[in-house]
Amino acid sequence: QKQNQSHSQNNSQEPIEGQNSNQVVRHKRSPKDFIFGKVIGEGSFSTVYLAKDIHTNKEYAIKVCEKRHIIKERKTQYVKREKEVLNMLANAKHYFVRLFCTFQDVERLYFVLSYAKNGELLPHITKNGSFDIECTKFYSAEILRGLEYLHGLGIIHRDLKPENILLDDKMHALITDFGSAKILGEPDQTDSSSQDHRETSTRTQRRNSFVGTAQYVSPELLSNKISSPASDLWAFGCIIYQMVAGLPPFRSRSEYQIFQKILQVDYEVPDGFCEVARNLVGLLLVREPSQRLGANDKQSIGYTSIRAHPFFNGIDFEKLPEQTPPPIC
Ligand SMILES: Nc1ncnc2c1ncn2[C@@H]1O[C@H](COP(=O)(O)OP(=O)(O)OP(=O)(O)O)[C@@H](O)[C@H]1O
Ligand SMILES: O=C(O)[C@@H]1CCC(=O)N(CCc2ccc(Cl)cc2)[C@H]1c1ccccc1Cl
């Protein structure tokens, strides 16, 4: 719309004259600030569009959620949690999809996210059959760095899977989808609603009904509903296995049978599966969360025992963002 000069919206980051220079006023965005392009994806209650900011010409992925549908599906908490966790990741420079801003209108919520031009990791694994060891090492290392940052903030993802690892234009990994995340130390919903204040240790939380995606869910989430950062380490083990084998470790026609296999830690390793990768997967797919490799590492310094595993020989964890990801072949 025509901007009235005297009240022209300052949507860029320049300070407005009359304000001291280090103060930048950001005006609340609205759909009018963007040109909405093609649909790049659909969620169970969201549609994601490729969009361009009319002021900067920058491209974003805008996730649009219908309020009516969210309320009907009783997912209001999920949506609020996604925004809350994305905000906590605002200072992360790498390894996560970033949230630039949110706004809403009567019917919808809008999340302006970084655009992961190369989509989800999953199709890159399946299309290619599986990854070679160089690719597997690189992407496992980037995911591990993301988990170190996330767990360092006391956040458990709880639904880590190759569909939730996106790839940016340079093919670097971006973890996304934080609606199922748990923030350690916050009062658990069950505590506030139920009278009995059940003991929950700091590192693990008693769980309410949430369970992640069948193939990647950890045994503890299926049995006693307690999740901890080690629950993400289990999913991490499943993802490494899947990059090497091309399929997740726990597979079956029925979800119930997948759960049975997970609870028994019943998986096979195909012939030709790289031995050193098999060893690492074997140290992560351990039924007892506290016995998983990395479970007892100090959160503040990262997963030193996983980084030290021979599988990561040759990986410089600090230099990953500057590296060119190995071609998927
Ligand atoms: N920042 C992004 N950049 C590029 N593509 C994205 C981005 N965010 C989401 N997508 C794509 O849009 C699709 C829908 O994502 P969205 O997060 O809305 O739903 P979902 O989490 O995939 O589904 P559900 O809500 O059922 O879990 C996904 O398949 C994803 O590939
Ligand atoms: O949590 C927040 O930061 C704000 C607070 C103000 C606000 O009204 N909302 C929307 C809350 C909301 C969530 C779900 C539905 Cl279905 C309707 C409204 C929240 C919101 C705004 C825009 C995008 C997402 C969210 Cl959760």
Image (cartoon, rainbow, N blue to C red):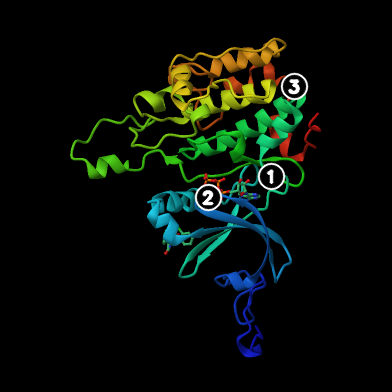
Q: Is residue 24 visible?
A: no
Residue topped by disc 1:
119
| Three-letter code for the amino acid on which mark 3 is drawn | Ile
Residue at 74%, 26% in the rendered image: 131
Instruction: Give the spatial CA distance, label 1 vs label 3.
Output: 21 Å
* Vertical arrangement, residue 61 with respect to residue 183, above or below: below
Kindly indicate whether the residue at mark 2 contacts the one at mark 3 (C-beta within 8 angstroms): no
Q: Which residue is mark 3?
A: 133
Q: Tell me the distance, in whole angstroms, between the alpha carbons under discs 3 and 2.
A: 31 Å
Q: Secondary structure at mark 1?
A: loop
Disc 1 from disc 2: Cα separation: 19 Å
Q: Picture coordinates of residue 188 (x, y %)?
A: 32, 41
Residue placed under numbered mark 2 in the picture: 86
Mark 1: is the Cβ under 8 angstroms from ligand 1?
yes
Q: Is 226 displayed left or right of 239 in the figure?
A: left
Position above or below: 10 against 46: below
